[in-house]
Each structure stands twice: as structure tokens, then as C-alpha cells.
């Protein structure tokens, strides 16, 4: 029987596969529609996300909501998750072993939702997704805004862009994010193909 997002969420809630469980207030499995066409991926929960157990609820989340509106989308239309489900202390960078332990949850979520478009927010999420699909990642500065097409459960589009939090520190990046989020509309206009051919990501 195929799994659902709730099954994965239950496992995450009890997960102790890496040391980050010791520091979390709440884990942040991600949230959104099980049949979303757009799946947004960030790096890891921040302070406010850890407090509330929800992704992108701090200032970066407010900006993300604005950006989604530019794409004619609401939070309820999409799925939003992170590569790591627990907050690294003081928002430090994820360690490779933490990504290795945690990322199977994200891959399983992708396999349930089978989105048409994956929006990668920031260099960590982008480099992870590029690796997953065997794409070469040349850094977020070069890759942002370029839409890639990959074969997974169906034709899937991958759009790397900056993390909204980056625009809080460098306001000039907001324009770049707006430009990238406008492209989401174009992708969604393309013919929707039936979501049926599940790619084997190496996950049983
Ligand atoms: S970060 Fe991921 S692997 Fe580590 S304890 Fe949290 S849910 Fe488990």
C-alpha cells in the first residue's frame, strides 16, 4: 500500500536518527497539499519554525507568502518542506551526516506528492535536489532562475532560487526572487502530464 504524508510525519515526530533531535523544540515535517503541483524546499527550520513546528513562519515566511502571491499561489496550494526536519543549533549549516540521515524523509514526501515543479530555496536545497536528479550544480549565483527539466514520476521542472531569508539581509535579492517566482506561472501553464511513472530514487 502506498504511504501518505501523515505516515511520514509520524515517523519524523519520533525520529532520533541524528543528534539534532536533542536540540529541537518541535520538529518541522513540512506542510501542504498531498497533490500539490508545486513543492518548495528550504534548508532547515529556523528559530520560529522550531517553536511552532511549521515551515517558513518567521520573517522569511512572510516574504515567501508574498512571493507565492506573485506566482498566483497561496500556501494552501503548495507543499513546503525542508531538507532537515529539525533545527540545527544557532542555525548553523547542516552537517553532511545530518543531511544523509534526514533527506530520505524529503524524498519520500516528494514521491507522495509527485509535484510538477520543485522550487529550491537557497544553495543547500538546490545542491541537494540537483544531486538527487544527477544534475551538476554550479552555485546558486549561476543556477538561480534557470529552469531544469528532469524525468522522475513524470516530467518535473526544477527551479533554483535564493532563500527568502537571504533577501532579508540583502534587499536587492528580493527583485531577483520576484523575477524567479514569476516563472512559476509559466511552468504551471505547461500541459500537466499524468503523474504515474514513479522514478526509483533508491528508496524502497
Ligand atoms: S533532523 Fe531529521 S534525521 Fe535528524 S532527528 Fe530530526 S528528523 Fe531525524
Image (cartoon, rainbow, N blue to C red):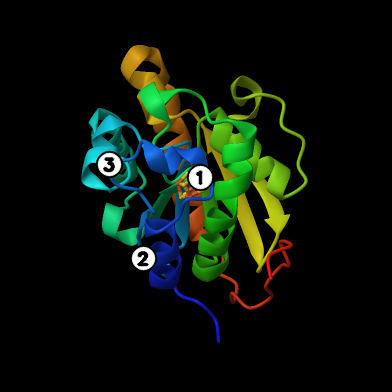
**Can I make out residue 26 in this image?**
yes
Q: Earlier in the sequence, mark 2 or mark 1?
A: 2
Q: In the figure, is residue 15 to the left or right of 66? A: right
- Whole-angstrom CA distance, mark 2 to mark 3, is 24 Å
**Residue 25, which numbered label?**
3
Would you name the residue on which mark 2 appears? 33
Would you name the residue on which mark 1 appears? 119
- Asked if marks 2 and 3 touch (Cβ < 8 Å), the reply is no
Of the two numbered discs 2 and 3 in the rendering, the one whose residue sits closer to the viewer: 3
Q: Position of residue 161 (x, y in %)?
A: 51, 32
**Can I make out residue 74 in this image?**
no
Q: Quadrant of the C terminus?
A: bottom right
Q: In the figure, is residue 93 to the left or right of 81? A: right
- Whole-angstrom CA distance, mark 2 to mark 1, is 15 Å
Identify whether 161 is placed above or below 26. above
Q: Position of residue 83 (x, y in %)?
A: 51, 44
For mark 3, give the secondary structure.
loop
- Whole-angstrom CA distance, mark 3 to mark 1, is 27 Å
Q: Earlier in the sequence, mark 2 or mark 3?
A: 3
Amino acid at each position: 500500500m502506498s504511504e501518505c504524508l501523515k505516515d511520514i510525519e509520524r515517523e519524523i515526530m519520533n525520529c532520533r536518527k541524528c543528534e539534532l533531535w536533542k536540540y529541537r523544540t518541535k520538529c518541522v515535517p513540512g506542510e501542504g497539499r498531498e497533490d500539490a503541483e508545486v513543492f518548495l524546499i528550504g534548508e532547515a527550520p529556523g528559530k520560529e519554525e522550531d517553536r511552532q513546528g511549521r515551515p517558513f513562519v518567521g520573517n522569511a515566511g512572510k516574504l515567501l507568502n508574498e512571493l507565492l502571491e506573485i506566482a498566483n499561489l497561496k500556501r494552501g496550494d503548495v507543499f513546503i518542506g525542508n531538507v532537515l526536519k529539525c533545527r540545527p543549533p544557532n542555525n548553523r549549516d547542516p552537517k553532511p551526516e545530518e543531511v544523509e540521515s534526514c533527506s530520505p524523509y524529503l524524498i519520500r514526501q516528494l514521491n507522495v506528492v509527485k509535484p510538477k515543479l520543485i522550487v529550491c530555496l537557497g544553495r543547500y536545497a538546490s545542491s541537494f535536489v540537483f544531486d538527487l536528479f544527477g544534475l551538476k550544480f554550479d552555485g546558486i549565483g549561476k543556477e538561480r532562475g534557470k529552469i531544469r527539466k528532469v524525468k522522475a514520476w513524470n516530467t518535473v521542472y526544477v527551479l533554483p532560487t535564493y532563500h527568502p531569508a537571504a533577501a532579508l539581509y540583502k534587499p536587492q535579492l528580493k527583485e531577483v526572487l520576484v523575477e524567479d517566482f514569476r516563472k512559476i506561472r509559466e511552468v504551471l501553464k505547461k500541459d500537466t502530464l499524468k503523474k504515474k511513472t514513479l522514478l526509483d530514487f533508491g528508496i524502497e
